[in-house]
Image (spheres, rainbow, N blue to C red):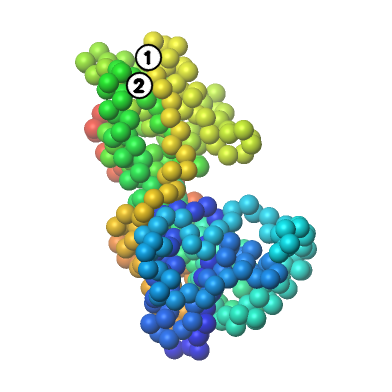
Amino acid sequence: MTNVKRIGVLTSGGDCSGLNTAIRGVTFSAITKGWEVYGIHNATDGLFVRPMRYQKLTMADFTCPYATMGGTMLGTNNSGNAHIQERADGTIEELTDEELNQRFKDGIKELGLSALVVIGGDGSMAIVSKYCKMAGISMIGIPKTIDNDAPGTDMAIGFATAKSIVADALDKLDTTATSHNRVIVLEVMGRGAGHLALEAGIAGFADAILIPEVSYTYEGLRECLKKSRAEGRKHALVVVAEGVKTPDGKHSFATNGKTFGGISEYFATRLQADGFNVRANILGHIQRAGSPVVEDRLLASQFAVKAIELLAEGKDNRVVVHQNGQITDMDLNDVLKISNTPVDPNGEMVKTARSLGIYVGEK
């Protein structure tokens, strides 16, 4: 066993359910080994600001409600601009790359950390890994994303809860769709991946599911809904992943011009013009919220225990992953060589949807 005695843990990127479970797992597993754990606030920003923002974590910190809450008790940051930091008096300072490197190194030294566990995406891990190398400490990554497209792992923290939330929303929308003989188009998150839309759509008994990985035609969607109506079903549920493009190859964006948002309105408008009674719904950030379901609690706990085991073995620059039903690990550099994992257009989930009569684009 190495001499790792005091470690840090932080969350980075967008939040999701299961992060507090992972923080808890890291803390409990490390303390069981006699180590100390420090939670860094607001991703790496907690080490960049002065005074630093952090807390020593104990088992008592996870007495309810934190153990079962969504979000992250440590805070996070996905702005991508660490150079802009807020001082204690509320004023802003702009730091150079050299200053960021030095502050990170000084912060690690002041806290006496010998390793850092990063719960985030592969991009966050790559950035923090460079800082850790310059500071001379080890880094272990734990993947999380509701999109479930993290490279190298079959599952990531947050996905199971998010798809449960979407499926529950579909259950609720089905009742109002039935009451008013409506087509309801539900837009869900996922960026450029359709895992969330596809799996939740199947579980929520959708009539059509549109995802970025499978081509579709508007006419195909319209004919699916017409056929359903002709067979006596007066309402329908359509699930659309936010990254789906319009038939002319354009993305719909929210007002900032960067974040996907609004593709559901596009389909609602066209379907309404074709005689359907339609409402569009954008589920939004509720998909990131809520108490984690059992699957996420188990996965987060397993990932956390594996991360501490890797540090105890003297490993560095590794990412904990779930592959073929097993918890294992990969070198971060190998993970970064793999692109994000999209839905397989010929995979079992797409086949399942089509076999159930769900329109999932063109074969």
Kind of residue at disc 2: Val
- Would you say residue 333 is visible in this rendering? no
The residue under the point 40% across, 69% down is 62
Q: Quadrant of residue 210?
A: top left
The residue under label 2 is 183
Please tell me the numbered disc located at residue 362.
none
Label 1 near label 2: C-beta < 8 Å? yes
Kind of residue at disc 1: Phe
Q: Quadrant of residue 248?
A: top right
Q: Position of residue 161 (x, y in %)?
A: 36, 50
The residue under the point 52% across, 82% down is 6
Q: Which residue is situated farthest in the front direction here? A: 89
Q: Earlier in the sequence, mark 2 or mark 1?
A: 2
Q: Position of residue 178 (x, y in %)?
A: 27, 22
The foreground one among 336 and 60 is: 60
Measure the C-alpha gap from mark 2 to mark 1: 7 Å
